[in-house]
């Protein structure tokens, strides 16, 4: 019996048991769809986070107060000396440094022209717009002046401007933040979100004013943007040496963009594979039912097996026929599940474009291989049962 004969036999057998085959394929399809969907969501989330992190550039070093071995934003305020505005100014003198942005962040009530609301307040340096690739649509960003004596100016995010001033021109108007009055000198162009933070629903003020409003001694973070021509290791060593000279010891944490990306990428890859694993578990559970169906099929086709053996088919040929049916069911079910998810991904991109879903070729290939493997595993026991049948007893069953 050659390969084409095997295929004809397999398709004929599946066609003769159409309803049972369809139910088995649906079981495979549901399991594969779950696995592909969870893996695609994990991969989409990974790509989304990487894109978010790289939108401000890839040559960035973040310095936070406190010595810690973990990566992320936010300060740890158990240091001997705070991370100060003077530190951020000193960092500008390091060779290769292009821009330094001190950051203090919080939430406060904003009042203007009889309206008020709570929103995010970012105390930053005058170069934050250039460093973070932000654009000003009206007026200007914070002016470069003595960082300790920066005047009470404010720049509004586009969404915040619309909610406080509507269609009116806000330039020259005053807003109140926590009892402090700021003159509006600019409005930012729409930027969107960064890891869940709406950059358009934000107000930017000088870093020294942010420290005063939030009653902080230390900056939460200092972002250092450097030239691509400067090796990252050399830059971080220079930063460490300078801050140790100023603080007396290493009471700060330096995290490069590469370290942040590698850490986030590893975490999100684990989530991606965990999602695929959960889908595979559901497929294994479905395989139990598929095995039962195939066992019943062997019992009902006892006479057919006896006829094959009587006509000269070997045990291995009979076994391969039943294994081939199981693998074919797995392959067709896998293709059906992938097709359903592909259509779902297209619909999501059309109607919910913000949802991070990425259907990649490697996910599809692994899903199909897993589907065929599960089919093979589910067909082993029924196939072995078929080979153990005596030809004479099988023919008597007719």
Image (tube, rainbow, N blue to C red):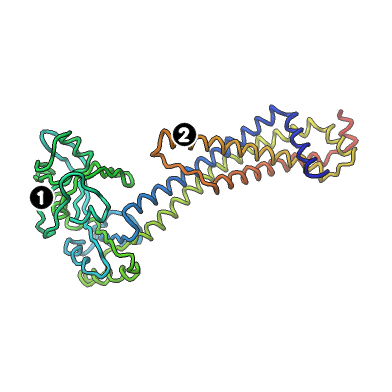
Tell me if 236 is positioned left or right of 171 in this view. right
Q: Position of residue 271 (x, y in %)?
A: 46, 48
Q: Where does label 2 land, which residue? A: 347
Tell me if 197 is positioned left or right of 182 in this view. right
Element at label 2 = helix
Q: Residues within 10 Å of mark 2 (few under 14, many from 20)?
A: few
Q: Where does label 1 land, which residue? A: 152
The quadrant in which residue 72 appears is bottom left
Q: State which tag comes first along the sequence, 2 or 1.
A: 1
Q: Residue at x 33, y 56 (%)?
A: 57
Q: Residues within 10 Å of mark 1 (few under 14, many from 20)?
A: some
Element at label 1 = loop
Q: Can residue 107 be seen in this snapshot?
A: no
Picture disc at residue 181: none
The quadrant in which residue 317 appears is top right
User: Mark 2 or 1, which is nearer the eye?
Assistant: 2
Tell me if 341 is positioned left or right of 394 in this view. left
3D distance between C-alphas at marks 2 and 1 = 48 Å
């Amino acid at each position: 019996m050659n390969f084409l004969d095997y295929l004809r036999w397999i398709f004929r057998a599946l066609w003769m048991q159409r309803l049972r085959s369809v139910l088995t394929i649906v079981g495979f399809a549901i399991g594969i769809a779950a696995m592909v969907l969870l893996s695609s969501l994990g991969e989409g989330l990974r790509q989304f986070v990487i894109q978010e992190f790289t939108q401000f550039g890839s040559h960035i070093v973040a310095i936070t107060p406190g010595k810690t071995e973990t990566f992320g934003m936010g300060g740890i305020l158990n240091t001997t000396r705070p991370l100060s505005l003077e530190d951020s100014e000193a960092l500008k003198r390091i060779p290769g440094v292009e821009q330094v942005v001190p950051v203090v962040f919080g939430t406060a009530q904003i009042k203007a022209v009889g309206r008020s609301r709570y929103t995010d307040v970012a105390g930053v340096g005058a170069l934050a717009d250039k460093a973070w690739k932000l654009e000003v649509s009206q007026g200007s960003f914070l002016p470069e002046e003595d960082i300790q004596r920066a005047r009470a100016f404010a720049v509004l995010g586009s969404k915040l401007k619309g909610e406080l001033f509507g269609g009116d021109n806000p330039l020259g108007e005053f807003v109140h933040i926590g009892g402090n009055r700021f003159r509006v000198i600019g409005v930012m162009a729409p930027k969107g979100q960064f890891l869940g933070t709406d950059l358009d629903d934000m107000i930017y003020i000088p870093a020294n004013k942010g420290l005063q409003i939030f009653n902080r001694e230390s900056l939460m973070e200092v972002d250092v943007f450097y030239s691509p021509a400067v090796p990252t290791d050399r830059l971080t060593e220079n930063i460490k040496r300078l801050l140790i000279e100023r603080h007396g010891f290493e009471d700060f944490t330096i995290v490069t963009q590469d370290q942040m990306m590698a850490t986030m990428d590893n975490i999100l890859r684990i989530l991606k594979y965990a999602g695929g694993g959960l889908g595979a578990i559901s497929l294994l559970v479905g395989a139990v039912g598929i095995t039962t169906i195939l066992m019943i099929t062997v019992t009902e086709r006892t006479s057919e097996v006896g006829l094959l053996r009587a006509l000269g088919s070997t045990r291995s040929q009979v076994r391969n026929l039943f294994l081939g049916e199981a693998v074919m069911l797995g392959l067709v079910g896998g293709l059906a599940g992938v097709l359903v998810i592909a259509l779902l991904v297209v619909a999501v991109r059309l109607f919910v474009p913000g949802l991070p879903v990425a259907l990649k070729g490697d996910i599809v290939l692994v899903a199909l291989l897993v589907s065929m493997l599960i089919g093979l595993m589910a067909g082993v026991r029924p196939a072995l049962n078929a080979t153990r049948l005596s030809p004479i007893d099988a023919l008597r069953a007719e």
